[in-house]
Amino acid sequence: MRRLIELLSELYPKWWRERYGPEFDALIEDERATARVALNVLSGAFWMRMRTLLGGSPRDSRILGTLTKNWWLLALSGGIQAIISALYLIMQSEPTPLSFHAWNSMLVVLGRLGLTAGACVIMAALLASRNGKCWLLVLNGSALVVLGVIELGLTRFGVRFWTVAMLVILMAASTGVLELRMAQMLRKKGRYPGTWILSLTSAISVGFVLPFLALALRWIKIEPGSHTDLLWLGVYFAFSAVSMFTSALRLHTAPALS
């Protein structure tokens, strides 16, 4: 049991172990090696990991410093997502069904745009990341890249809308949590007075989880030929473009973070 507790303690984030490791090890040595202690260690490691994921570690300022330097990549991704939104809405609003060739051509364009926009988001999280990597943004960009790959593959393979909806849910949730954390950090440091806009876009972004979950679980019925799924995708990417532009603007106009 003692060995198990030692292994579980390795699950704590690196920053936590560097700061509290010796004290924690001494405390564990004084405790009896019981299942309850092992469970407490596992629970503590989980919550510290969640705190780090949500941006609550001492790396907050360093992560924001990375994003401040790479704000233009977020703005570029926002511009590409605006084009993606326009294409989805055009496909949905066509009075007559698109031909097979036109449909496949649109999917190829959407796939390439998705790959590019996702790559921009990932680079914004990792480029010049000596100041800290933003894994929530990596998750967002990775989901967008996978969506782009799926759209390229739709010309050859069928994919259920459930998969697409789950990817959008990942993007919406990760963006919402990140923007909320950014607003909290900027407000705490007195960096920018307009952080309420980030809080608002955060709430709206998380709000997109519900309709896409309803679409994935078929609580919202998609009538044949209505292309309701394309409408929702167009609306989401329109908002995501605005959200990216908003985040980029706040990061660009805030003083340097370190």
Image (spheres, rainbow, N blue to C red):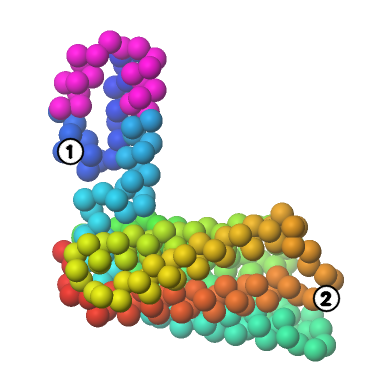
- Above-or-below relation of 57 to 157: above
Q: Name the foreground residue: 45 vs 184.
A: 184
User: Residue 218: image x %, image y %?
Assistant: 75, 58
Q: What count of labels does the image hold?
A: 2
- Above-or-below relation of 244 to 168: below
Q: Please say whether residue 84 is one of the residues in the magenta stretch.
A: no
- Which region shows up in magenta? 23-42
**Marks 1 and 2, Cα distance to the nearest angstrom?**
58 Å
Task: Please say whether residue 199 is visible from this viewpoint.
Answer: yes
Q: Name the foreground residue: 69 vs 200.
A: 200
User: Is 224 left or right of 204, judged from the image as shown?
Assistant: right
Q: Main secondary structure of the magenta part?
A: helix
User: Is 192 left or right of 154, judged from the image as shown?
Assistant: left
Task: Please say whether residue 141 is visible from this viewpoint.
Answer: no
Q: Which mark is residue 225?
A: 2
- Above-or-below relation of 240 to 38: below
Q: Which mark is residue 18?
A: 1
Q: Secondary structure at mark 2?
A: loop
Between discs 1 and 2, the one toward the N terminus = 1
Q: Would you identify the image quadrant in which residue 55 lies? A: bottom left
Q: Amino acid at mark 1?
A: Glu
Q: Residues within 10 Å of mark 2 (few under 14, many from 20)?
A: few
Which quarter of the rendered picture does the C terminus lie within? bottom left
Q: Amino acid at mark 2?
A: Gly
